[in-house]
Structure formats: C-alpha cells, structure tokens
Amino acid sequence: MSYEFLFASAIGVLVAGGIFLALRARTFQVVMGLTLISYAVNLFLFASGRLVLNRPPIWDKTVSEYTDPLPQALVLTAIVITFGMTAFVVILALRSFLETGSDHVDGDRVPCDAQDGLADGEGAEP
C-alpha cells in the first residue's frame, strides 16, 4: 500500500469530519470542525512537498537527495496561526455563550435542549 493513498485518505477523513462538525448548530462543534479542517490543510501542505522517507530536510555534501524544507516551514507557520485563531474563536464562543445564555451558533436564546438532558426540568436546580 502506498503512503500517498494513506495520506490522502487521512486528509479526506479529516475534511469530512470537519465539515460535518462545522455544520452543527453548537459553537463547540463548529470550533472542533474548523480545527479538523485546519489539520487537514496542514497535512495537505506537508504532502505538497512529496512524501519522502529517510531523507534529511537540509542539503548536505554527503547526501545526494534531500526533501523540500519549504512545506515543513509552511506547516510550522500554519500550526502557530491555527493555535492563535482557535484561541480567538474559543473566546468569542465563550463571550457569545455568556451574553446569550445559549451555545447555539445562530444566537437564539434556547435555555435547554432535549439533547442536553435538561429538558422538562431534568437535572435543573430547584
């Protein structure tokens, strides 16, 4: 089995899961979906430099072949940017939750849902 097929399958699964979660109506699932999509983009950037095993990323006189270091640098930069943007989106989601009392993306006030287990006063404080 080739590494490219396995890598492409992993990217496809991450994108599918990310899109599924990003289309949910809850802020946490949307944040997790965007994170999965960013992981898939990082893998895609890494794969753009061709997958080569057991080769150094820097040219050396003793080694005739080396891997392209540019995708590795792009992925490192993308990881830092993704971390900053994820932290920013989590703070926005927390602020939205504290202002509206709900974690729905559309901002409607929904005090409890059936999937929360708090519908009909179950688990609610007296």
Image (spheres, grey):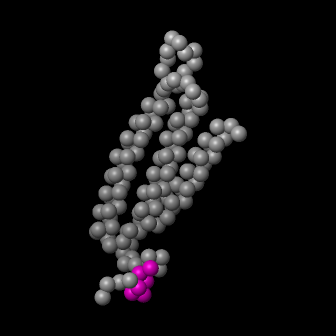
On-image quarter of the N terminus: top right
- Pick whichever, 101 or 80, lies toward us: 80
Q: Position of residue 34 (x, y in %)?
A: 46, 53
Q: Does 79 appear above or below 110?
A: above
On-image quarter of the C terminus: bottom left
In this view, the residue farthest toward the right is 1
Q: Does 55 appear above or below 18?
A: above
In percent of the image, x 55 and y 24: which residue is there? 55
In this view, the residue farthest toward the top is 61
The magenta stretch is 117-122
In percent of the image, x 55 and y 56: which residue is there? 17
Q: Does 16 appear above or below 101?
A: above
Left or right of 15: which side holds 119? Answer: left
Magenta stretch encompasses residue 105: no
Residue 73 in view here: yes
- Pick whichever, 118 or 92, lies toward us: 118
